Amino acid sequence: MNKLLNELCGKYTVPQEAKAAGIYPYYKAISSGQDPVVTMADGHKALMFGSNSYLGLSDDPRLKEAAKAAIEKYGTSCSGSRFLNGTLDIHNQLEERLAKFVGMEEAVTFSTGFQVNLGVVSALGFRGGYTLLDDTDHACIIDGSRLGWSTVYKFKHNDMDALEKKLKACEPEAPKLIVVDGVYSMLGDLVPLPRLTELAEQYNASVMIDDAHGLGVFGKNGSGVANHFGLTDKVDLIMGTFSKSFGSLGGFIAGSHDVINFLKHNSRSLIFSASMTPASVAAAAKALDIMESEPERLEHLWDITRYAWKRFRENGFDINATESPIIPLMVRDTNKALQIVTLAYEQGVFITPVIAPAVPEKDVLIRFALMATHQKEHIDEAVEKLTVIFRELGVIE
C-alpha cells in the first residue's frame, strides 16, 4: 500500500481519542431486531431511541415472510442493474404503486436512498443551470450536486428570503432545481413548503423533496410532506427511501413521465448499480400494504410523539422547533454530548449524537427518535434517565 496514503490517513486520530476517553459512540453491534428494546452483541439491553424505523416495521413478521417468499421465487440477488438484467416484475409493480401513493405519474427504484439523491441531483444538474440547496440538506444531496454541471447555490436553513435572493441571482431562462428535505433529519422540522412553492412558481424553478423522513409519518396514510401541505401538484419530484418507515432497504424517485424517463437513461447510480434485491422489494411492498390499511399505526406514532414533546419540555429540555417524531435534545457542546450518549447507554438507553461536521458546535444535539412500536412507558423511562444525566452535566437545570 502507498506509504503516503497510510501517513495521511494515520493523522486522523479523532476516533482513537474518543475511545481513549471512553466516549466513542459509534459502531455498536446489535444482535436483535430494531424493536423498542434491543439486545446488544455484548448482551446489554437498551431502549432503542436511535432508529429511523418510524412505523416499527423493520422487525414485523409480515415483512419477514414477504422477504422470504421473494427469495424462494427470485433468489437472493438480481445480479445486474435495472438497465440490463436486473429488472423484475415486482420492481415494476412496486414503482406503479409508489407513484400512485405519492401522487406522481411514474417512479423508479434505486438500491439505496443515498443513491437516489446522488443519481437524480447529479443527472438534473444541467450545464448552464442552477441547483439550489438548503444548507442542512442531507449529505447525499450535497454529493449529488457536486457531480452535476450546474451552478450550486446554498441558502440558510428554511429561510425563504435567502432562497429568493439566490433565485434572483439566477439567469431567468436557465433551468433551476430547488432540492430540500421534507423533514430535516437532525432538527425534526419541516420545510416551509407553501412559501417555497410560491417562490418556485414565481421564478420558474422546479422543486424536489427528499422525503426520506416524511414518508410514513406525514400526509394521508403516510404519503408524505407534499400531501400533508396539500401541495403535491406544486412539487415536481418526490424522493423516498425504504430504510426508514418502510422497514426495508432501497429508495425511489417519483415525478413526471418525461423526467423519470430521462433519469432511467441518464442517472449513473441507477444504471451502473445492481438493482434492489427481491427481498428488499417484497418487504417494501408489504410495508406499503400495511401503511395503507393500518392508519392506527400512524395515529399511535403521533400520540406518543406529542407525549414525548410534552415530557421533555416539562423537564426543561430544549427540543428546538421539532414538528416530528425526531426530537433534538439540544446540548451545544460536543464533549458533553458524547458523555451523555455513553452514560445513557450504560443505563440502557440507546440514543445518537449529532456533532461536527454534521452541525456546528452551537447546534450539537442528541437525536431522540420514536417508533410506532414504542409505548409511553418506554418514553417515561428514557426521559427520567436522561433528565438525571443532563442535570448532572449542567445541560438543563
Image (tube, rainbow, N blue to C red):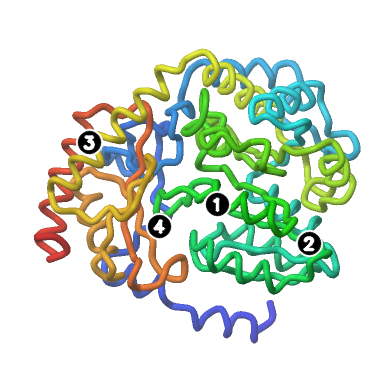
Label 4, secondary structure: give it.
loop
Q: Nearer the viewer, residue 360 or 131?
A: 131
Badge 2 density bin: few <14, some 14–19, many ≥20, Cα 10 Å: many
| Left or right: 204 in relation to 81 | left
* Disc nearer the start of the sequence (2/4): 4
Residue 26: mark: 4
Label 3, secondary structure: give it.
helix
Label 1, secondary structure: give it.
helix
Residue that carries the numbered disc 2 in the rendered image = 125
The answer to the question of whether label 2 and label 4 lie on touching residues, with beta carbons closer than 8 A, is: no
Q: Quadrant of residue 250?
A: top right
Q: CA distance from mark 2 to mark 4?
A: 34 Å
The residue lying at 68 percent from left, 29 percent from top is 103
Residue that carries the numbered disc 3 in the rendered image = 379
* Disc nearer the start of the sequence (4/1): 4
Q: CA distance from mark 4 to mark 1?
A: 38 Å
| Left or right: 165 in relation to 150 | left
Q: Nearer the viewer, residue 370 or 68?
A: 370
Residue that carries the numbered disc 1 in the rendered image = 195
Q: Nearer the viewer, residue 205 or 378?
A: 205
Q: CA distance from mark 3 to mark 4?
A: 23 Å
* Disc nearer the start of the sequence (3/2): 2
x%, y% of residue 172?
Answer: 79, 66
The residue lying at 84 percent from left, 36 percent from top is 257
The answer to the question of whether label 3 and label 2 lie on touching residues, with beta carbons closer than 8 A, is: no
x%, y% of residue 70?
Answer: 69, 19
Q: Nearer the viewer, residue 227 or 380?
A: 227
The answer to the question of whether label 3 and label 1 lie on touching residues, with beta carbons closer than 8 A, is: no
Q: How many numbered marks have been drawn onto this rendered protein structure?
A: 4
**Residue type highlighted by circle 3:** Ile
